[in-house]
Image (tube, rainbow, N blue to C red):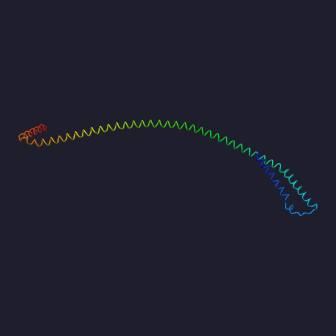
Amino acid sequence: MNLTKKILASICFLFGAIAICHLLGSQALAAEAEGGWRSNYDLIMMWVNFAIMVIVAIKFGKAPIKGFFRDQKENIARTIKEIEAQKEANIAHIRQTRQLMEESGVRFEEIKEKIIAEGRSKQQAIVEAARWESQLLIENTNFWIDHQVLKAKQRLKSELVDLALEQALQRLPQAFTPEDDQKYINHYLTEIDSLTK
C-alpha cells in the first residue's frame, strides 16, 4: 500500500513540475509588458492547453496507470507468496535437518558403543593370544633348556668316556703282559675259524 502511495505522489509531483515548467516557460518570462489582449489571450490559452493536457493524461493514462499499479500489486503479492513458501520450505528443511542431527546423534552413540564393545572383545582376544604365545614361549624355552642340559650331559659323558679311554690306554699297556696278548690273539683266531666253517 505504501508503494502505491509513493508512486501516486511521484506522479503528482511530476505533473506539478510539468505545470510549473509550462507556466514559467521562456515565452511567459520573456514577454514584453504590452497592455493588449494578446498577452492575456496567450496566458488563457496556455492554461487551456495545460487543462487539456491534464484531461488527456487522466483520460488515457488512468487505465494504464491503474493496470500498472494492479500488475505491481499482483507481482508484489506473488513475490510475497513465493518468499513465504520459500520461508516455509526453509523452516521444514531446518526441522528435517535438526531431526536428522538428533537421529545421527543417537546413531553415533550406538556406533560408539559398538566400537567400544568390539574394542573390548579385540582387547580380550589380544590378551588371550598374548597369554597363549607367552605359554608357548615358556614351553619352548623349557624344551630348549632341557635340550641344552641333555647336550651338556652327553658332552660330559663323551668327555668322561674319552678321559677314561685315555687313562685306560695309559694303564693297559702296563697291565697286559705278552702272554695276555697271545691269549687274546688265539681266542680271536678261534672265533674267526668257527665263523668261516
Task: Classify residue 114 as left or right of residue 148.
Answer: right
Q: Position of residue 132 (x, y in %)?
A: 37, 36
Q: Could you tell me residue 136's position as x and y percent?
A: 34, 37
Hey, which quadrant is residue 87 in on the image? top right
Report x, y in % for residue 8: 80, 49
The x, y position of residue 114, in whole percent, is 49, 36
Q: Residue furthest right?
A: 37
Please give the count of numbered marks on the rendered protein: 0
> Which quarter of the figure is the N terminus placed in?
top right
Quarter of the image for residue 184 reads: top left
- In the depicted structure, whether residue 107 falls above or below residue 53: above
* Depth check, front residue: 187 or 44: 44
Can you tell which quarter of the image residue 181 is in? top left
In the picture, measured across the screen, residue 104 lies left or right of residue 116, that is right
Q: Name the side, left or right, on which 44 lies relative to 170.
A: right
- Front residue of 7 and 95: 7
The one nearer the camera, 34 or 38, is 34
Rendered-image quadrant of the C terminus: top left
**Residue lying farthest to the left in this orientation:** 179
